[in-house]
């Protein structure tokens, strides 16, 4: 969460006023009148003074980093911070999932930043019981959160940063619960700064050779009378070719509001200082994990359809925020839908790259077929015993339509439209679901549907293109189930499911040796490659271009 800006209300002339009103941002609650936390501050003519080489206003990550570097260069630093914690968004802001580049474990950060990360990890290694696997994990991620390779409790981050500051001794004077309320300028420079201490309710004057605005919101700019603009500038102002033609004052980074459920308040009090626990009141609309099931179901079906159509290829990353934007809903129901799809083994989560469409393994495919065989043979036996005449006739009609489409597809696989291929896939799935429906067992129907989502995923069609099946392949199965005995229906279903499994596994063996990047490339639909091209051609194409 971006730290709240200290709102200053100057009373009277800016040059002569001796009383100012200062908002204590840490004390503000989610409910009530903010005026209750405004301090009326009287500035005496001779406040106590503190001297240092550099004043760093704001002890967020930027302010702390500047203070550490300045101290290492031999300078003294006054580091002010309005809240009780150093670290800014990563600690007091409650967003302790570091926003880093994907190469962070090897490169792309300063020495002090890496020191902070290792101190956080060492804290958990030394003070918490870890599993044997976690003890061997060199790049330990205590929170195991997919958005970052290092997630932790905010208090642990504070402890790590405070230790780094303490190592600089008297070079850094940390002034917590202190806000800059006035800058005294002259001759084009800042001569001193007046700071208000919320706990002691006194004003001190800080004399520094250099003043750094590390408030993250530019709080010192208006106090210093420095010209500034908000938002993005026009191309005519900067001469940047990629800038917009007109300025946009509203083009600023949005705020992040961390929310906590009331059910976790007891845990939160162990992480946050008591003054910040009030944030839980902001989470009243999210009670005990209550999420609109209608939104979850809509998000689930939307994502599932895109996977089945091949619009989201196997191995492709899935963005929760992009999906939420497309569906015009919050991220919560999308995350719930993705969790459901992960349980159904259609997607998977990785701590480095987030969520993606699951890449099946040979063991997965054998497992899918084994489960499918067990479920569908049971369904066909129940269909023989329970299905009505209308359901039997409907199954035979669907089989005739399905066989006709497959015959058309096998004759001209390269010219078969992708949309018709998707319709063929849906009809195929519905054919098998009709057998489950005739069994009159809702639970069995749902389990078969989950398995068929995996079996009829676009993955296979994009890999193999045409699927040449025996003449009236589905018609024979429908006749066996609708007109045969239990044993005949059972045997026909097993034969139907098991057909060409070993041949399929043989053709997949070479494909599964591809790395993830080439896997996604091989499975993604490309306009330059017809759907009818088989897997060996696809692999050859990738090998040549590699």
Image: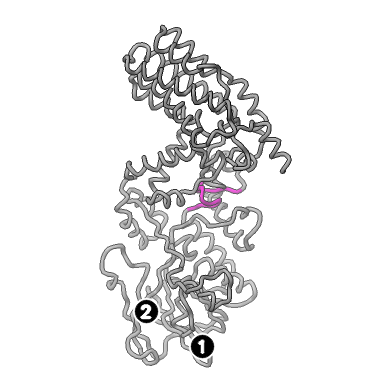
Q: CA distance from mark 1 to mark 2?
A: 20 Å
Q: Looking at the rendering, which quadrant does residue 427 occupy?
A: top left
SS for dot 2: strand
- For the C terminus, give its image quadrant: top right
Is 146 colored magenta in this rendering? yes
Image: magenta residue range: 139-152
194 left or right of 235? left
Q: Nearer the viewer, mark 1 or mark 2?
A: 2
In the figure, 394 relative to 305: above or below? above
Residue 418 can be seen in this image: yes
Q: Which residue is under mark 2?
A: 8
Name the residue at 37% across, 76% down.
7
Q: Nearer the viewer, residue 103 or 513?
A: 513
Principal secondary structure, stretch drawn in magenta: loop
Residue 434 in the image: x percent, y percent?
Answer: 39, 22
Q: Is residue 78 visible?
A: no
């Amino acid at each position: 969460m971006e730290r709240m800006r200290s709102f200053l209300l100057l009373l009277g002339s800016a040059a002569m006023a001796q009383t100012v009103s200062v908002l204590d941002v840490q004390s503000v609650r989610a409910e009530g009148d903010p005026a209750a936390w405004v301090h009326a501050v009287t500035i005496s003519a001779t406040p106590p003074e503190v001297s240092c080489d550099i004043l760093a206003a704001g002890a967020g990550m930027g302010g702390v980093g500047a203070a550490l570097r300045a101290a290492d260069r031999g300078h003294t630093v006054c580091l002010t911070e309005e809240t009780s914690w150093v670290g800014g968004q990563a600690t007091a802001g409650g967003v302790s999932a570091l926003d880093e580049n994907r190469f962070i474990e090897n490169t792309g950060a300063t020495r002090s930043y890496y020191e902070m990360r290792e101190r956080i990890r060492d804290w958990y290694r030394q003070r918490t019981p870890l599993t044997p696997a976690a003890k061997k994990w060199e790049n330990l991620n205590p929170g195991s959160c997919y958005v970052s390779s290092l997630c932790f409790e905010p208090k642990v981050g504070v402890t790590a940063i405070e230790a780094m500051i303490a190592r600089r001794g008297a070079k850094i004077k940390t002034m917590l619960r202190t806000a800059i309320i006035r800058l005294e300028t002259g001759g084009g420079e800042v001569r001193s700064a007046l700071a208000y201490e919320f706990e002691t309710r006194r004003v001190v004057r800080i004399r520094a050779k250099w003043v750094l605005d590390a408030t993250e919101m530019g709080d010192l700019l208006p106090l210093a009378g420095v010209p500034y603009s908000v938002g993005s500038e026009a191309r005519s102002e900067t001469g940047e070719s990629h800038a917009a033609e007109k300025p946009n004052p509203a083009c600023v980074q949005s705020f992040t509001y961390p929310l906590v459920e009331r059910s976790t308040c007891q845990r939160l009090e162990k992480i946050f200082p008591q003054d910040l626990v009030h944030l839980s009141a902001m989470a009243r609309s999210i009670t005990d994990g209550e999420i609109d099931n209608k939104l979850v179901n809509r998000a689930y079906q939307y994502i599932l359809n895109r996977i089945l159509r091949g619009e989201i290829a196997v191995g492709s990353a899935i963005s929760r925020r992009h999906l939420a934007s497309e569906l015009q809903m919050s991220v919560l129901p999308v995350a719930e839908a993705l969790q459901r799809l992960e349980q159904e083994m259609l997607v998977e989560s990785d701590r480095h790259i987030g969520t993606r469409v699951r890449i099946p393994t040979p063991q997965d495919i054998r497992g899918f077929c084994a489960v499918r065989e067990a479920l569908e043979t049971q369904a066909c036996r129940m269909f023989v015993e329970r299905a009505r005449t209308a359901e039997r006739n409907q199954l035979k009609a669907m089989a005739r339509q399905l066989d006709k489409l497959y015959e058309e597809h096998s004759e001209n696989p390269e010219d078969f439209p992708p949309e018709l291929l998707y319709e063929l896939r849906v009809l195929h799935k519905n054919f098998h679901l009709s057998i489950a429906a005739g069994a009159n067992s809702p639970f069995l129907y749902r389990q078969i549907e989950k398995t068929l989502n995996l079996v009829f995923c676009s993955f296979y069609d994009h890999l193999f293109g045409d699927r040449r099946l025996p003449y009236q392949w589905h018609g024979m199965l429908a006749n066996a189930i609708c007109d045969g005995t239990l044993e005949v229906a059972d045997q026909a279903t097993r034969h139907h499911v098991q057909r060409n499994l070993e041949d399929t596994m043989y053709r997949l063996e070479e494909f599964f040796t591809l790395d993830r990047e080439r896997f996604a490339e091989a499975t993604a639909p490309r306009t330059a490659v017809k759907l009818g091209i088989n897997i060996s051609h696809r692999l050859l194409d990738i090998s040549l271009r590699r």
